[in-house]
Image (tube, rainbow, N blue to C red):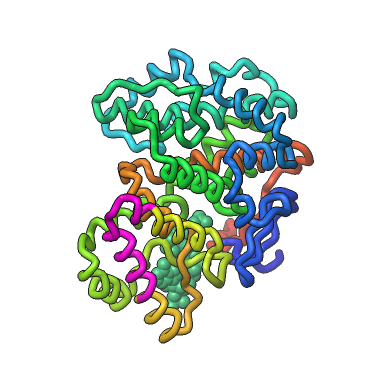
Amino acid sequence: MKDFKKGLEGIIALETEISYIDGVKGILEYRGYRIEQLAKLSFVSIIHLLLHGKLPTIREHDQFSNMLKERRELDVHTKEVIHFYNFNIEAMDALMTAISHLSHSDPDLNSNSHEENISKAIRLIAKAPTAVAYFQRIHEDKEIIKPNELLPHSSNFLYMLRGEIPTVLEAKILNVDFILSAEHELNASTFAVRVTASTLSDIHSAIISGIGTLKGVLHGGARLAVMNMLDEIGDPKKTEKYVMNLIKNKQRIMGFGHRVYKVVDPRADIFRDLAKKLAEEKKDMKWYEMATKIEEVVTRELVEKQGKTIYMNVDFYSGVIYKYLDIPPKLATAIFALGRITGWLAHALEQYKDNRLIRPRAKYIGDHHTPE
Ligand code: CMC
């Protein structure tokens, strides 16, 4: 049997046309377009690009956007399930439950054809934000706020969550957040989605595998950990000491390090600029100042002194942005999922198109007990 790599590090497991990463040059592309270029577009364009393989024309964009708007509301049974499960349950668990339920109310329940899977994908992208917003409103003992067809995808989510129409900058930032979170090659959750799809299980089940995997603190859960870290520090003046302590105790600094990037994650750079703009709009530099200080100490201590390639990743400044957007920390990973669901769906569709069951081997290192 061939050698194995712990964590499958560096192993090419499959071919894809969906995204490209150069971890040394800090390049990320979705279907050949650089992330910096895509971050200037609407999330609807990115959904179209990832699902259909091309950016939409203006007409296609409007049609596609309307299609998503019309599909935002949840069926009555899924709403009941969200109500029922609303006792001390995590948002990611509620999202898995809601999606599991949505599969049974989907009009194309019994088909796994490409066309029908595209329809299911559009419905899932449209409904997932509603499920998360309803969950949070019910959790806070507030009235649910129905989707507003006049608002674009990201503004509508913030509106359903907070009950007020977001500022232009807030809406723009969440739009960018969804775009930057949408896709990232064969990360752990996308791999989980493809493994599930490769068994020819249905697309809803594949997405549930992705959500369960994204939940972990080494993956999507790092965003929540960053928010918790900022709260724990509490004061920009205490930042240096706090980070030095983590480093002294060989603890990980959340929002730093990456399996693929050996330079700054290009998504993190985009988020840093937006976090600064948002801090200025809110006239509150506290979280931004803390974040830049953390970055300074990590760079000085781990990169310059110890020669490690531990730079900030996508979760670092997005955690800062969520603080300014007043996102409840427990929703942080679920909001990541609202962006990433698009990439997962694109990968599930790609897997179904040219499927081969994903079934690697394990190297047995236990004992062999030979019969006497
Ligand atoms: N803080 C301090 N040291 C770190 C960190 C960190 N955040 N990340 C890695 N290291 C050190 C680690 O201790 C090890 O040191 P040594 O060689 O002396 O033992 C070295 O760097 C290599 O670490 P590794 O665990 O072998 O690297 P990996 O490729 O398995 O880890 C990672 C990647 C993302 C799991 C890790 O960097 C980490 O735990 N980061 C914190 C959690 C986080 O921010 N996760 C979000 C990842 S990006 C979002 C996504 O794409 O999903």
Residue pictured at 28% horizontal, 76% vertical = 244
Frontmost residue, 222 versus 210: 222
Frontmost residue, 275 versus 186: 275
- x, y percent for residue 111: 69, 21
Residue pictured at 72% horizontal, 50% vertical = 31
Residue pictured at 52% horizontal, 32% vertical = 152
- Residue 290 lies in the magenta stretch: yes
Residue 27 visible (yes or no): yes
Farthest bottom residue?
Answer: 305
Q: Is residue 227 left or right of residue 222?
A: left
Instruction: Using the rendered view, name the quadrant where residue 372 is placed.
Output: bottom right
Q: Considering only vertical position in the picture, is 97 above or below 267? A: above
Q: Considering only vertical position in the picture, is 248 above or below 369? A: below
- Residue 309 lies in the magenta stretch: no
- Residue range in magenta is 278-296
Q: Is residue 58 left or right of residue 101?
A: right
- x, y percent for residue 335: 44, 41
- x, y percent for residue 327: 33, 43
